[in-house]
Structures are given as structure tokens and as C-alpha cells.
Image (spheres, rainbow, N blue to C red):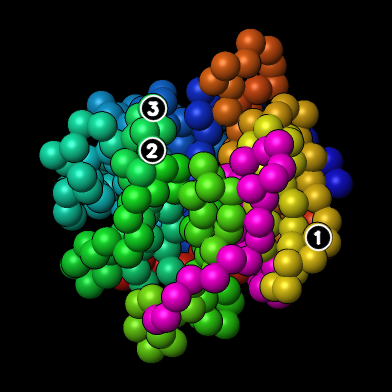
Amino acid sequence: MNASVFSDVACALGEGPLWHPERQQLFWFDILGKRMLSVEGDETRIWQFDECVSAAGWVNHDTLVIASQTGLWRFDLLSEERVLLCPLEADNPTTRSNDGRADPWGGFWIGTMGFHAEKGAGAIYRYYRGELRQLVSDVTISNAICFAPDRSCAYYTDTNVGTILRQPLAVQSGWPEGEAEVYLDFSGEDFGADGAVVDADGNLWNAQWGAGRVACYSPEGALLASVSVPTPQSSCPAFGGADLSTLYITTAAEGLDRSPAGQTFAAPTSVVGQREHQVIL
């Protein structure tokens, strides 16, 4: 499968695509450009920030939770008012937010990393019922945060290590329960495991940085399909569209000097994605 251009606005580091189910609208981020983007009608809408922003979850029709390099914020799409929910490594100038996604219980998971991918500088956190709790420490490049449709587990990776882990979760609360295990091992590959999303059947779709594709794996780890984009630095996928069968893919232009690097792509698929989970504040 091949993807076509959804937005030709180039992002230095495209990330964090989110399909808002109530608005039927895709939001995504250019981390290094310090901006959030969306398509409204025939135009790309841009919200500019004063610091790096990387991921979001939806709260209601007009409200998002946005992760930035210093905090988690409640953001009003109409007024553009931003209210701090909690600091996120705000006292650490080395790090910024990276990959994140809402979980089935209304929590929000967010990873951090060093601006220059300093080894072990980042972590993975969960924000739930007003509390931010660190779940994983010593992470170099946090990525691939996503959740099984049966609520049994979360997935995540440290791209620097190259293994996607499967973390069992308590069914009632969503907190980690037991030890994480290796689900996919890409440590010997020439690409990096980047952002990921799980479809309604439990298959994981992983953006593979350097390979210019999103690859789909069964819960058992078998390669099932792949979607190609015409630029190598594919960064994160999300399912959206009216029937949740369109796969949106962000990419990055950083270090590349030609189009379509950094553009955002869309590909029709034969599967259905999960509805993005609502963040409960």
C-alpha cells in the first residue's frame, strides 16, 4: 500500500497525529517548529507555540490536552487559552516531550527525551485523575505508546534500544501490572521503531524511521502488511476518517533537503482503527 499527500506543509519533525472523533479532524505537531497543525476546509491551520509541543489527547469537542517541553496543558481550540495541568520535567532544560497517547481509562501517557537524544535522559509518564506518575525511567527516545483494544496491555519503545515492549495493565485502573516483555525486536535492523497505533483487531502499526513505511504486526508479532511513504523519515501513524479506516502518517524533514520530506500522508486501508480515547480531566 502507498500513501498520498494529506498536507504538503513540511514539518521539521512531524509527530503526534490525533484524529478527533467528535470534530472529525486530524491534528498533528511539528515538534521543532513549535506548532500544532490541522486541515480545515482546503487550508492547513497552524497554532504557533513558544516551546516545543509534541502530542495531544481530546477532552471534548473544543478542548485538547497538549504535551509540551515543560508541561501538560488544557488547550481551548476556540479561544486558544492554555491552562497548565501539571509540569513535565519543567526544571530540566535538557528534555522535551515526545510521543504520547490517551489510554482507555481516560489517562494520558507521555514520553520525554533529550533535545539531542542524550542517553537515558527521558522517561515515560501517565497523567491520570490529576496525578502525573513516572512509569519508565532511563529512556533515550520514547516512542510507540499505544494500547490493546481489550485493555490488556500498553506498548512502548525506546527507539535507541530497538525493542517494542508489551506492558501488562490492570484491567480496572490501567496502571502497569507485572513486567514488560519484548514484543518486537528491531535492534538488528537499519531503521528505528518510531510512533505506533493499534487497530480494532489488536494489530500494531509501527512507523519505521529510515525505512519510509508503517508496518503492521499481529499480536503475535507476525508482519501482516506495510504502507509506504515517499520519504524515509516516517514518524507516527494514526487511524481516522469517517469509518476509521484511513491511516495518517507524519514524517520529518530534518536533515533532508527535498520535498516531500516532512509532509503528512494518508492511506486507505482494509482495516478499522480504534476510536481515539477521551482524556478525562
Q: Nearer the viewer, residue 207 or 273?
A: 207
Give above or below for 13 relative to 132.
above
Give above or below for 127 relative to 246.
below
Q: Report the span colored magenta.
A: 177-203
* 183 in the magenta segment: yes
Residue 61: x percent and y percent?
Answer: 39, 59
Type of amino acid under label 2: Lys
Q: Residue at x 46, y 31 (%)?
A: 30
Type of amino acid under label 1: Leu
* SS assignment at label 2: loop
Q: CA distance from mark 2 to mark 1?
A: 30 Å
Residue 119 badge: 2
Total marks in image: 3
Q: Nearer the viewer, residue 25 or 28?
A: 28
* 7 in the magenta segment: no
Residue 72 badge: none
Residue 178: quarter of image? bottom left
Q: Which residue is mark 1?
A: 223
Q: CA distance from mark 1 to mark 3?
A: 31 Å
Q: Residues within 10 Å of mark 1 (few under 14, many from 20)?
A: some
Q: Earlier in the sequence, mark 2 or mark 1?
A: 2
Q: Is residue 163 left or right of residue 120?
A: right
Q: Residues within 10 Å of mark 3 (few under 14, many from 20)?
A: few
* SS assignment at label 1: strand
Of the two numbered discs 2 and 3 in the rendering, the one whose residue sits closer to the viewer = 2
Residue 213 in sight: yes
Residue 241: quarter of image? bottom right
Q: Nearer the viewer, residue 50 or 167?
A: 167
Q: Are marks 1 and 3 in contact (CB under 8 Å)?
A: no
Type of amino acid under label 3: His
Q: Residues within 10 Å of mark 2 (few under 14, many from 20)?
A: few
Q: Residue at x 75, y 58 (%)?
A: 216
